[in-house]
Image (cartoon, rainbow, N blue to C red):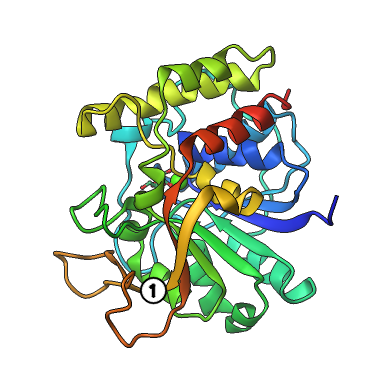
Amino acid sequence: MTTPLPIIIDTDPGQDDALAILLALASPEFEILGITAVAGNVPLALTEKNVRKICELAKRTDIKVFAGCSRPMLRKLVTAEYVHGKTGLDGPDLPEPTMPLQSQHAVDFIVETIMSRPEKTVALCTLGPLTNIGMALAREPRIAGRIKQIVSMGGGFFEGGNITPAAEFNIYVDPHAARLVCEAGIPLTLVPLDATHQALTSAKRIERFRKMPNRSGPACAALLEYFERFDEQKYGTDGGPLHDPCVMAWLLKPELFVSRYVNLAIECESELTMGMTLVDWWGMTKRPANATVCRSVDAEGLYALLSERIAKLP
Ligand code: RIB
Ligand code: CA
């Protein structure tokens, strides 16, 4: 086995974040240096608690969990309890966490880790609004040249948005942070709704989790059953899109995705299209390419990877 990839997961759990974190915890290809919580799906006090609940579900109380920013860099916080429930992790009844929250601020942890580790060795996996990363870049611009890569769930182009017709939630919540990340010259992969909307849950896929003889599998089934209901009603589909595990899957099995290296820009001026990700898929502008953007995912392959790995957890 090659040397595990050191990663920091930045997240706003969120049921789909939970499955992404569990996938990472079940994958020896990763060395998880820390998990940083950010305000997004629900306020920070809940997202940081949810990260610890997920780590305890997987019996990984060794993981360092940090609380980050409680609001976007400039705009007011917008949350999504209507999707994730009032706890942000509705579905299974997970006990209150007892593992510690680190006292260091997540932004300081990100800066300190990137500055102290050999350059171009640490990858950031972002599953929520990019506020912590934007603030880290503002706090220490030198990290831009030292980060190996950022893989980020966010945006949408031909698929449009999911919180406005133009914008996807993670980017919409903090478009200014997203623009900072997008313009920082860091190797960036974006996994947008164009790909994640192909990764629909289904009764069969959920059943695979429910039947696992461990506790993580049935918990994932309960998380997905709760999570899918909003999008099923909204889109009239059988099952809902599973967004955040696609970030870990890109690093584990990039062959599951179709992607292209193109120009990505973030709209931060117009309230009408705030947070829109402009993806120049057809090379119509002279703007230089700055991101690898995914357009599709092999959904069956994604769920096979998820099931195989989650089955290995406690
Ligand atoms: O738009 C989907 C994204 O917003 C996912 O990361 C989900 O967890 C929410 O954060
Ligand atoms: Ca998320």
Query: In x, y percent, where is residue 147?
Result: 65, 72
Q: Give the tally of numbered discs.
A: 1
In the image, residue 148 above or below residue 87: below
- Residue 124 image point, x, y percent: 61, 61
- Going by the picture, which residue comes out furthest to the left? 272
User: Percent x, y for residue 45?
Assistant: 49, 43
Drawn side of residue 272 relative to residue 142, left or right: left
Q: Quadrant of the C terminus?
A: top right
Mark 1 residue type: Arg
Q: Which residue is mark 1?
A: 179
- What residue do we see at 23% from left, 65% from top? 274
Q: Quadrant of residue 312?
A: top right
Residue 100 visible in the displayed image: no
Taking the view exactly as shown, the residue that stands out farthest to the bottom is 286
Q: Is residue 196 visible?
A: yes
Q: Residue at x 63, y 53 (%)?
A: 251
As drawn, is 41 to the left or to the right of 3?
left
Q: Residue at x 45, y 52 (%)?
A: 128
The front one of 49 and 254 is 254
